[in-house]
Amino acid sequence: MNGAKPNHSTSTTISSAATVDSRTVPAGTVWQLRNFEPALESLALFLQRTSPERFTTELAGAGVCALRTVPTEHDGIGLPVGSMILVDSLRWSEPGAVSLLGLRDGRILFREFHPEGDLIRFRSVVDGGGGDFVWRRSAEPGRILWMYPVLEFVLPMF
């Protein structure tokens, strides 16, 4: 990175005290997801509970959540700092879908989902976004804790 800081517009992120309409979704950082337990609550409820941020988007829906990358998590996710990711936490990723996934070892990856029977390939999406991740389900069951399809992602302009 060239040391430039992303330009975050205050017009898209609003506080939880503001009036909420149907286009406002819970928001937070990808880094927060390291504490997310999908067996205990939905991603939307987790972000509502742990983050005061909200994001206004035309892609709003019950499971839509907004996540942004921050310097702490940059290593390994596959997106530059300042990126914004919209996921649908109520849908499953379909083959070929760009997805955000959390691994048991604490890593969070942004990859394209390609199931091939017992072998699952997660391909890098952006240049310099980290290498492909390959998982054999029978050899390492439970390695993936959660996975959500990405509806949209926006890379920062430096």
Image (cartoon, grey):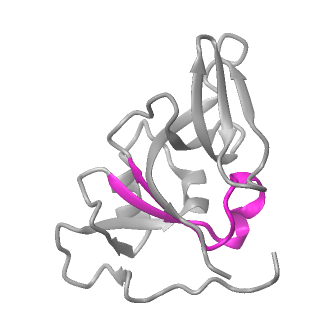
Q: Residue at x 64, y 71 (%)?
A: 70
> Is 92 displayed left or right of 113 in the figure?
left
Along the line of sight, the residue nearer the viewer: 145 or 117: 117
Q: Residue furthest right?
A: 2
Magenta stretch contains residue 86 = yes
Snapshot quadrant of residue 116:
top right
The quadrant of the rendering that contains the C terminus is bottom right
Along the line of sight, the residue nearer the viewer: 146 or 35: 146
The quadrant of the rendering that contains the N terminus is bottom right
Write down the region rendered in magenta.
64-88
Snapshot quadrant of residue 24:
bottom left
- Where residue 47 appears, as percent x and y from the top left, is 41, 61
Along the line of sight, the residue nearer the viewer: 131 or 34: 131
Q: Residue at x 60, y 75 (%)?
A: 156
> Is 137 displayed left or right of 146 in the figure?
right
- Position of residue 73 relative to residue 76, above or below, is below
Q: Residue at x 72, y 63 (%)?
A: 74
Along the line of sight, the residue nearer the viewer: 98 or 66: 98
Magenta stretch contains residue 68 = yes
Q: Residue at x 33, y 55 (%)?
A: 64
- Where residue 147 appears, as percent x and y from the top left, is 51, 38
Q: How many marks?
A: 0
- Where residue 7 appears, as percent x and y from the top left, is 58, 87
Snapshot quadrant of residue 5:
bottom right
- Where residue 123 appears, as percent x and y from the top left, is 68, 37
> Is 115 displayed left or right of 121 in the figure?
left
